[in-house]
Image: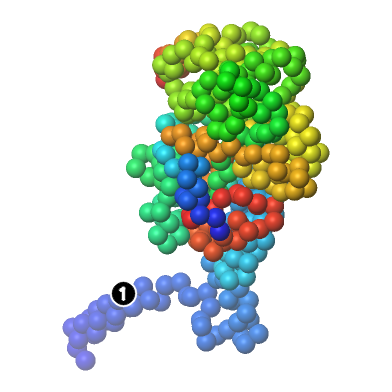
Amino acid sequence: MTRRKYVVVLMLLMLAVLLTAPWASAPKPDLAPDAAPEGQEATLEAPVFAEQRAELTVKIMQDEATFRLLERQSEVFERSHPDIRVHLERGDAADASSVPDDWQERTGSADVALVPSLWVKRMAVSGILLPADSAFEGDALSEQFEAIAAPLKWNGFMWGVPHHLDPYVVVWNRARLSAAARQDGSALTLPLGTEDWSTLGASMASEGSRPWLAIDERDPAALLTWLGAATGLRPDLLLGDSQGTWGTGSSAAMLNTLRGSVSLRAPDDSAAFWQAMAAGQYAAAVAPLSVAEAGIASLAPASAAGLSIDRSGWDKAYVFDGGASFVIGAGTQRESAAKNWIAAMTEAKLQLDNYDATGFFARLPFRL
Amino acid sequence: MPKLTDRGPQQFPNWAPEVGPDWPLLMKKLGLFWTDWRQGRLALADWPARWNGLLADLQLHD
């Protein structure tokens, strides 16, 4: 072989080394599929499974009964969705109509929260939520009642998925109501007309400082419901401007009978309160429908017959629904799992179950 | 399951409210007005005018 041929062969060899070098220096796979011993197969699969499993933290800013109900329903959900684990935590919604300043602290790093529906728009504007349009189950999005959907809409999106509603009503003790006589001598009956409110006020004023209305003074929605009933105005517009002289109308005298230092009792679901109500301790009470219907149902039939739920406020253009909606935290890394869980918790059959469930008496499903 | 829409005059409430993002704040203020009124610091007749003043203040600070 000539010297020139040696050089050519040497150059070809060097070229071959250069071309194959990247493969030789490439990192080896951690484990070749067929190199794993039989006993290690399970441990190899486990980390992959853990990566796929979503851990959802859900904060329920509602009462204990709502929390327990969702806890049971979520357990059923987890059995059919082994890839999603749900941790429910309860936080008190101390004021259903006001967003607390420390909402983010209260909900922490929650992926999902169940909050009073009136909070939702404020939270959306704050930028702490993700849109929830795609969390609506089936055709639920197109079946929403305007009264329920409107507080959840902002900027073209839905920011909450309603869980239940619980509109406010006024409950009357008919015996005390009929003790007030109109000018023509007839007793007051429901629904009250404009002039009836001043008749009622005069009658109650004649009883001195005895409290006659049971209302939760810490609950603005209850206060607005009562002001709307007494003034005949839409309760939501009482928050607006240009309501003119409602404070001097025929209902003003009636409202003024509530003034003074007499403490007003907040209605609750205790038997003691509703027995006192039936016995005539209060002429009227403002409460969410679920509290009113459960309270009346707990009474003996003869006592219950003396109370009437006045839903005439529902004829107005707005009534405080007292409901709650699911929202999705903007910081969640598990949006898809969150939406799956919300859709499952609000699907049609569960809505009916909620309606029938003990402790949820008269809490209305958002789909009918 | 009750047919709520068949309750005649007691119909299911289904009207869109005038709900804005500032509602929670306004409702908190309403609670304060109620307390003032009950404790005799605010006359009912003065309530609407004072409320309008509050709304104007809030708009100024937007």
**Residue B3 vs residue A330, the one in the foreground:** B3
Instruction: Give the percent coordinates (x, y) of residue A82.
Output: 59, 70
Q: Is disc 1 surrounded by few (<14), some (14 to 19) or many (20+) residues within 10 Å?
A: few
Residue A241: where, in percent of width, then height? 43, 18
Residue type (three-letter) at the residue carrying disc 1 = Leu
Residue A333 in the image: above or below residue A24: above
**A108 horizontally vs A22: left or right:** right
Q: Residue furthest right?
A: A272
Residue in view at x 66 percent, y 9 percent: B40
Q: Residue at x 51, y 61 (%)?
A: A347
Q: In which chain is the residue bearing label 1? A: A
Q: How is the image coloured?
A: rainbow
- Return the residue at label 1: A18
Q: Residue furthest bottom?
A: A1
Q: Nearer the viewer, residue A24 or A269?
A: A269
Residue A108 visible somewhere in the drawing: no
Residue drawn at (41%, 38%), measured in percent from left and top?
Answer: B16
**Horizontal and vertical percent position of residue A277:** 75, 34
